[in-house]
Amino acid sequence: MSTVEQTDVLVVGSGFGGAIAAYHLAAGGARVVVLERGPWLSGEDFDQDFRFGASGTRIFDFVIGNGMSLLGGNCVGGGSVVYFAAMPRAPRFVFERHGSLGRRMWPAAITRDALEPWYDRVAEALPISQLNWNDATYAGGLWAAACAHAGRTANPVPAAIDRELCTNCNWMLAGCRFDAKRSMLLNYLPAAVSHGAQIRPLHEVQQIARNQDGSYQVAYNTVHDVDYRVVTGSGTIQAKIVILAAGAGATPVILQRSEPVLGKMPYAVGRFFSGNGERLNTAIIDEDKARSVLGLDRGDGLAYAANQIGKGPTVASWDDLDDTKPEFERFSLEQLYFPPGLGTILAQTPNPDASVPAWFGPRKKEIVERWQSWLTIFTTSEDDNEGVFGPPPPTGNATRFSQQMLGFGPLTYRPTANTLHGWELSDAEIKRVLEKDGLAEVRPWTNEVVGAYTVHPLASCRIGDDPATSALDDTHELRGHPGIFVTDGSAVPGALLVNPAFTIAALAERAMPGIVRAARERGVDVRYGAPAPDGQTAARDASWTQAVRLAGAAGA
C-alpha cells in the first residue's frame, strides 16, 4: 500500500553528510525525516564475526562495477559505522589541485583556511584527538619502524576513538561493540532525534520528482530486513528541501533515475568519479627479520605476528604529500587492517614468476597460514576522476545478486596513465621500504579480478564554479534544481590523498548555514546556530535507546 506524507526536510542517507544535516535542521526547528536504506544497529548488535546475517554482511554495501568496486556503509550511521576513524585534515595543496582540467578543481570560496573552522566544529562534536606512540598498534609500530629503517618518517594519526573504551579487538570496521569508535550513532544522530528528527531504516529512495509549487516528492521502497532484494512496501514523502547524502555510489544513481520526472541533470552528475586513488599492498613479514633488522620484540617471544590486534590504522607516512612535487606523484602510505574475508581471498602470493599461480596452490596456502604476520599498506593518491556512471538499475544503486551486501553497479572506471603512474610510484616505494634487508615480501593489489577498489568513493556530484564540470555550486545546491542539496562524499571535487571522512563532515558543516537560508526562503521556519551536539550524552538518553529498539523491532 502506498502512502504520501509531508515534511519540511527529507534527508536521504544517515552517514556524515546526512546526520550533520539532520541535526542542524531539526535543532533549528524544521520537521526532518531521514530515510536510510540499511538497518538500525548499535552497540551490542555489532558482531565480531563475518558469518552471513551478522552485522558484517548487514551493514556493508559492496558494489562491483566495471573496473572499480566500491565498499560502503549500509546502515543507520552509514560510512561512519564502517570506517576506521582515522581523521586527518586534507593537505593544503589538495584544494589547489587542477587534475586534468587545467584549472583549479575546487570552488574559489573553499580553501584549506576557509574550511578550518568547520574542521574544528566536527572535531569538537565527535570529538577527534591525536593518537600518540603509546596508542600505536603492533602493526602501526612495525610500519613506523620499517619507515625509519628505510629513511622515511611516520606519524600517529588523529582519530575519532575513545581510547579508554577501545579494547584493540580490531573489529571496528564491522561496527564497534564498545562504542569506542565515534560514529554518527554517538553524536549527531541522537542529537537530531532529541530535536524531533525521524530516522527510518530499511527505506531505499528510488526517485525524486518536482511538484508544481516547487517542492519535491521523494519515492521510496521499504526492503526486507534479511533479504534486501525483497520489497515490502513503498511510499512517497513531500518535502520543501531534499538533502542527498546516500554516498558517492548511490546519490548520482538516484538523480539519474529521477531525470525523466525531475528534469535535465547537470552534465557532471554521475561523472568525474574518484576512488581517492586508493590501493592496497600486502606484505608477508619475516618474523626473524622483524626481530634482527628492526629490533622488535613483543616481550612474549614474538617480534610481530599481530596483524589482527589493534584498532585499524594508527600510523601513516606522509613524506610524499609534498606540494613541490607534480600532480599524480603525491601520495600517502598508511598501515591498515583489512579483515579476513575478501582481503584473504584476493591476496596474491608475492612471487615474481608469472608461471606460478598467484591465487591458489601451495604458496597461497602458506601465506594464508601466516596471516598474523601480514602487514597491509594503504595508498591514497591523485587519481584522474575517470569514473562514469551508466544507466541506473531498475531499483537501488546496484543489481543485488545476494540477500545482503553484494551487487553489480553501473560504474565504469578505466584508470588513466596519470592514475597508473601514481600507483606505480607508491607501489615501488612500499616495496623499497618493506623489502629492505629482507624484512618482507610484498605484492600489490591487482585489478584483474574485481578491478580497482575504493572504500572512500568521491566526486560523482561534485561542487565547483564551472557548470560544465561540477554538478553543485559552492553551496552544495544541485544546479538547475533549487532546494536539492548534496552533502556526502560525492560533493568532494577529487581525491584528497588522505582518509576523507573529516573533510566530508567539514564540508557538510560548512554547507548548513546556506541550506538553512534556502529552507527559510522556501517557507520553512528554521534557524541556524545550534551548538556542537553533545552526542555522547544523547546516546545514553532513554529516548534514543528506545528509538533504536523500536526501529529494530519493527524492521522498518
Image (cartoon, rainbow, N blue to C red):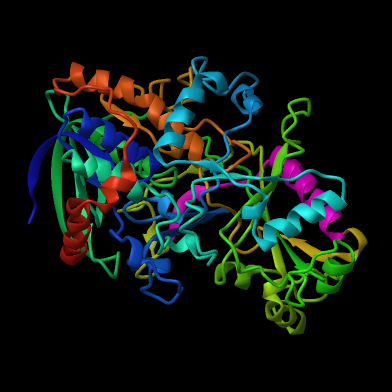
**Quarter of the image with the C terminus in it:** bottom left
- Look at the image and give the residue range highlighted in magenta: 407-435
Residue 210 point in image, percent of width and height: 19, 30
At horizontal 87% and vertical 53% (from top left) the residue drawn is 149
Question: In the rendered image of this protein, does residue 21 appear above or below residue 332?
Answer: above
At horizontal 55% and vertical 47% (from top left) the residue drawn is 86
* Residue 253 appearing in the image: yes
Considering depth in this image, is 124 or 300 the residue closer to the camera?
300
At horizontal 50% and vertical 34% (from top left) the residue drawn is 503
Residue 498 point in image, percent of width and height: 61, 40
Is 408 within the magenta? Answer: yes
* Residue 298 sits in quarter: bottom right
Residue 129 point in image, percent of width and height: 53, 42
Considering depth in this image, is 240 or 14 the residue closer to the camera?
14
Left or right of 38? Residue 340 is right
Is 540 within the magenta? Answer: no
Residue 340 point in image, percent of width and height: 57, 71
Question: In the rendered image of this protein, does residue 349 appear above or below residue 16?
Answer: below
Q: Main secondary structure of the magenta part?
A: helix
Left or right of 464? Residue 277 is right
Left or right of 361? Residue 543 is left
At horizontal 16% and vertical 29% (from top left) the residue drawn is 29
* Residue 211 sits in quarter: top left
Left or right of 30? Residue 19 is right
Question: In the rendered image of this protein, does residue 342 appear above or below residue 238?
Answer: below
**Quarter of the image with the N terminus in it:** bottom left
* Residue 359 appearing in the image: no
